[in-house]
Amino acid sequence: MKPRVAPILGLFFFCVLFLLLTKLLVAGSFARFSYPGDALLYLFGWCLFSLYVTRLIKRQVDGYTRRSTDFSRYLLLSAVSALLCATLATAFMLGIESWLVGKSHRTFDYLVNWLFFFTFFAFVINTYITYLYLGDLSNMRENLLVAQRAQAETQLKLLQQKVDPHFLFNNLNVLSALIERNPEAASEFVTRFTRLYRYILQHVDAEIVPLDEELAFARDYIFLLEQRFGQAYRFDLPPAREQTNGHLIIPAALQGLIENAVKHNEGSAREPLSISIAIHGDYLTVSNQLRPKSQASDSAGTGLENLQARYRLMTDRLVEISCGERNFTVKLPLLKVVNT
């Protein structure tokens, strides 16, 4: 949390007014009124501490559960923070008095002080919680808009793949050559080609798909690439029977990464380009050797940006991208349906 001068000054003046009103009510008249500066600093320090505790608890909760704008979640956070801070402040204040001055306190003293601190912290923390809620709500709306644009662009790309003349004619040329020299391979090519287009049609509007279906789709896509480029690209995939543990993934995410690797890197039968796809825990890792083509394909990097935006809508876990001297690696978080 980056410190901002205006909110801190506002909090300080609130403490000034709160203490002023409290002392006036207790004194009953201006003649008996006194304004303790040390109490003001003490109260302001506890205010800052309460905001820190609230922020710390929120970070822990966000780390274990997916972020949500359900307001009941923020109310619970407010209650827990206020109870904790009131208890700590009461124990600290009366404990210090007992230790330094030797003053004994009754249960009633603890109760009165606790109620005072709880009322005060409840107001301060609720104001802060409202600020956090509005900020999270604004961020979620912004992420939703970005992800929706990314989803729309991805859907458009999938629709374009259905009728992309280059993709279609390239594969028809491959099919024509296969029919002449290897009819059995041509039949397999048609089967895979049909399955690929069926997958695109079925999942063009889907937000997530089972990982095993995406892997099957990728195998069909790789088969078409191998028929077109021969042994120029060597693919290492998880075994077809490997357990995916019910994981989900954004549709066509894996296919897009394979397409990028082939599009931007040179491969040949003599020196095939290695592209590895593996499941590591809760991530699907796609890694390829870096061997940039002499004539680089036009790309603005929007494919990876769109993929990251779509993942931000689904999970707090990020798409991890690393580019070394020899390899380019992308780690896609694998998702699971959480029953609530």
Image: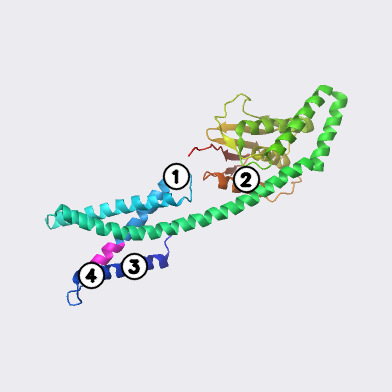
As measured in the structure, the alpha-carbon distance from the residue carrying label 2 to the one carrying label 1 is 22 Å
Q: Is residue 83 magenta?
A: no
Residue underneath mark 2: 307
Horizontal side, residue 109 vs residue 312: left or right: left
In the rendered structure, which disc, 2 or 1, sits on the residue that comes first in sequence? Answer: 1
Q: From the top left corner, tell me how far across and down residue 49 is, in percent.
A: 32, 57
User: Is residue 300 depicted above or below 131 in this figure?
Assistant: above
In the rendered structure, which disc, 3 or 4, sits on the residue that comes first in sequence? Answer: 3
Nearest the camera: 326 or 19? Answer: 19
Residue underneath mark 4: 25
Q: Is residue 158 visible?
A: yes
The magenta stretch spans which residues? Answer: 36-44
Name the mark nearer the viewer: 4 or 1: 4
Identify which residue is drawn at 83% across, 30% down. 175
Q: Amino acid at mark 4?
A: Leu
Identify which residue is drawn at 57% across, 32% down. 279
As measured in the structure, the alpha-carbon distance from the residue carrying label 2 to the one carrying label 4 is 60 Å
Secondary element under disc 1, as helix, strand or loop, is: helix
Q: Is residue 41 magenta?
A: yes
Nearest the camera: 268 or 69? Answer: 69
Residue underneath mark 1: 63
As measured in the structure, the alpha-carbon distance from the residue carrying label 3 to the one carrying label 2 is 45 Å
Q: Amino acid at mark 1?
A: Gly
Q: Quadrant of the N terminus?
A: bottom left
Q: Amino acid at mark 2?
A: Leu
Secondary element under disc 4, as helix, strand or loop, is: helix
As measured in the structure, the alpha-carbon distance from the residue carrying label 3 to the one carrying label 4 is 17 Å
User: Which labelled disc corresponds to residue 14?
Assistant: 3
Q: Amino acid at mark 3?
A: Phe
As measured in the structure, the alpha-carbon distance from the residue carrying label 3 to the one carrying label 1 is 32 Å
Horizontal side, residue 255 vs residue 26: left or right: right
Q: Residues within 10 Å of mark 3 (few under 14, many from 20)?
A: some
